[in-house]
Amino acid sequence: MEIVILVVVIALVVILGAGGLVVGSRRKKKQLPPAAPPSPPKVTAPPAEPHVGDEAEAPREEPRRTVEEVPLPGATAAPEALEEVQLPPAPAIEQPEPSAGRLVRLRSRLSRSQNTLGKGLLTLLSRERLDEDTWEEVEDILITADVGVAPTQELVERLRTRVRVLGTRTPAELRSLLREELLTLVDPGLDRVLHTESHEESPAVVLVVGVNGTGKTTTTGKLARVLVADGRSVVLGAADTFRAAAADQLQTWGERVGARTVRGPEGGDPASIAFDAVKEGIAEGADTVLIDTAGRLHTKTGLMDELGKVKRVVEKHGPVDEVLLVLDATTGQNGLIQARVFAEVVDITGIVLTKLDGTAKGGIVIAVQRELGVPVKLVGLGEGADDLAPFEPEAFVDALIGE
């Protein structure tokens, strides 16, 4: 019985499975609705070409030009015209006036010193009675004019003796007497010649030294004019590299008289520039090389030592013929302090006194010569290009005491 039931169950399972397969196969054979035809691919139209606006001009043909015919940017003329452009003419070379006799021609520039020193002394000495008070006033005038204490005492003592011996004191006699005594103090026997003649294988070398503000660079330029006026060929060395405008200033002075200026970079080695200037002077066969050094304060020991270095380096080419110390006549006794310090570093051979026209202290000539035992060789008597004059003792004293 159980077997019969099992057979029946199996048969039912088989029948039900077959029916499902039939149903599934029927479902698969069911017709689907026809698919819609595929749409054609979408094509994007190219952008339209820009059209000429209503207000635009119709294009017109222009003649074509070659590369050679097209002007360069900024050019306003054809290449042929550009080649004909005239360059500005070179500055004319000036011909300075001769240095001989300049001090005589510039005598009027000493008017302030003349009024204070010469005329003041003549007025005192013309008094009817020359007592102690009068002689003290004479001393005061001389000291105020920066003659110096020792020279003043010498002059007053000689004047007192000679006036006592003469007995009479006419204006002409007093003027002659004062002229002789002042001339003795100025010392006409000192060698005031500027040694600027070249040697066989090298030019003469002149170092110009001094502190800031004395007119050193200007004096160097004016000295170049003095030498050119006397027939010398000159090369300038701009060894003042610590003042930005010094080299430009010196070069301007040189160009006016046709003198070449050797310069270097700002803040460069002054000794190197001085060396190159002398080397250039040798190559050009110049008569004289003028070297403008930096304005050194006499209190700056390092800078003063550097000045000594400049001199030693230049001497590798040959001797230094002149070392000119530029002093401002208006500084008075302070100029003597500067002179002493410079004389310790380099051997000063001559003094250049500037601004002597603007001071009542003409006696500084006497004082500085006594202090250094070095002659005053040049004096500046104005701001003009040719107002630097060789110092002439007789003309100087005559200018002090007047006609």
Image: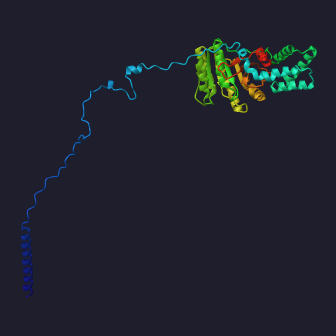
Residue 315 at x, y percent in the picture:
67, 20
Colour pattern of the rendering: rainbow
Does residue 152 appear in this view? Answer: yes
Does residue 372 appear in this view? Answer: no
**Left or right: 63 in relation to 188:** left
Which residue is rendered at x = 7% and y = 73% of the image? 23
Looking at the rendered structure, the number of numbered marks drawn on it comes to: 0
Query: Where the C terminus falls, by quadrant?
Result: top right
Residue 54 at x, y percent in the picture:
24, 41
Which residue is rendered at x = 66% and y = 28% of the image? 294
Which residue is rendered at x = 36% and y = 26% of the image? 71
**Left or right: 109 in relation to 15:** right
**Left or right: 228 in relation to 329:** left
Placement of 202 over or under 3, stated as above or below: above
Q: Quadrant of residue 93?
A: top right
Q: Nearer the viewer, residue 294 or 272?
A: 294
Placement of 93 over or under 20, stated as above or below: above
Q: Nearer the viewer, residue 201 or 333?
A: 333
Residue 21 at x, y percent in the picture:
8, 72
Query: Where the N terminus falls, by quadrant?
Result: bottom left
Q: Quadrant of residue 132?
A: top right
Residue 273 at x, y percent in the picture:
61, 24
